[in-house]
Amino acid sequence: MNKRHTRIIFSLNSKGGSGNTAAMISLADYFIHNLGLEPVLIDCDLANKSHGSLSHAFKGTPKLDIRTENGLDQLLAIAVPAEEESEQDGGTRVVLADFGGGNEEDTVRWFDEMFDGLKDYDISFLGIGMLTSNVATAKGIISWSAELRDRISYLIIKNHMVGEDFSYLLETEIGRKFLRFWSSDHRHGEADDQHPERVGKPWPELAPSD
């Protein structure tokens, strides 16, 4: 049998209050109750001490400060435990990590230093970005994507819960840049000026391992 694949899903959090944690909680709930998966959950948003945090929604979820020198190495150790590295059990191990704001620089540096060394592991990454009516979220997603490029896959969620006015996508330079960026061939997106709601692309469906 093939070695188990690990899918690490993390939030591209550049601005608090955009719905990143709510999306991760909903995704964890979906995996558990709809797909029958048991995702590994990691709460990396240390600033979120409210009842809405990932570790509050799912008791027993560890808190991890990925801004320390070895923080992301620790995340990888949780995602791919040493005792499972040689297991041949197949299937997919899903890891959900809720990143807090201010983690972009550390995450990009880690990818620059470590990504090539991960080729011996069956690991893939998915970044989830929340696009809201605040133009800063579009700017943040562009920044993350420009740095991480095609080393990860992307899912961009258009969040209407914090506002319905997305006119900046067509009326501001940042908004138009966002649409151009996600409609370009190397991003494989489907957004354009006539259909700004079509941003990002989903990941392949994950099914429970046998």
Image (tube, rainbow, N blue to C red):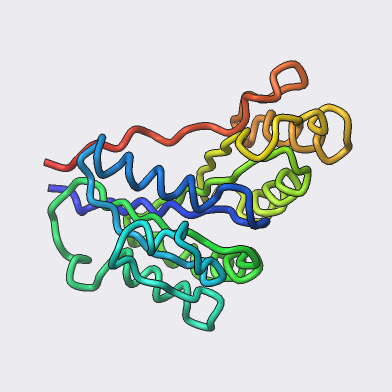
Query: Which sits in the foreground, 81 or 112?
Result: 81
Which residue corresponds to the image point at 47% horizontal and 77% vertical from the top-left?
Answer: 71
Classify 147 as above or below 208.
below
Judged left or right of residue 187, residue 65 is left
Quadrant of the rendered structure where residue 60 is? bottom left
Classify 178 as above or below 142.
above
Please provide percent x and percent y for residue 168.
82, 33
Query: Which sits in the foreground, 179 or 47?
Result: 47
Which quarter of the figure is the C terminus placed in? top left
Quadrant of the rendered structure where residue 193 is? top right
Judged left or right of residue 34, residue 185 is right
Which residue corresponds to the image point at 80% horizontal and 36% vertical from the top-left?
Answer: 175
Query: Which sits in the foreground, 158 or 198?
Result: 158
Judged left or right of residue 38, residue 29 is right
Classify 111 as above or below 68.
above
Quadrant of the rendered structure where residue 196 is? top right
Please provide percent x and percent y for residue 194.
75, 16
Please provide percent x and percent y for residue 91.
20, 46
Query: Which sits in the foreground, 137 or 209?
Result: 137
Which residue corresponds to the image point at 25% horizontal and 44% vertical from the top-left?
Answer: 32
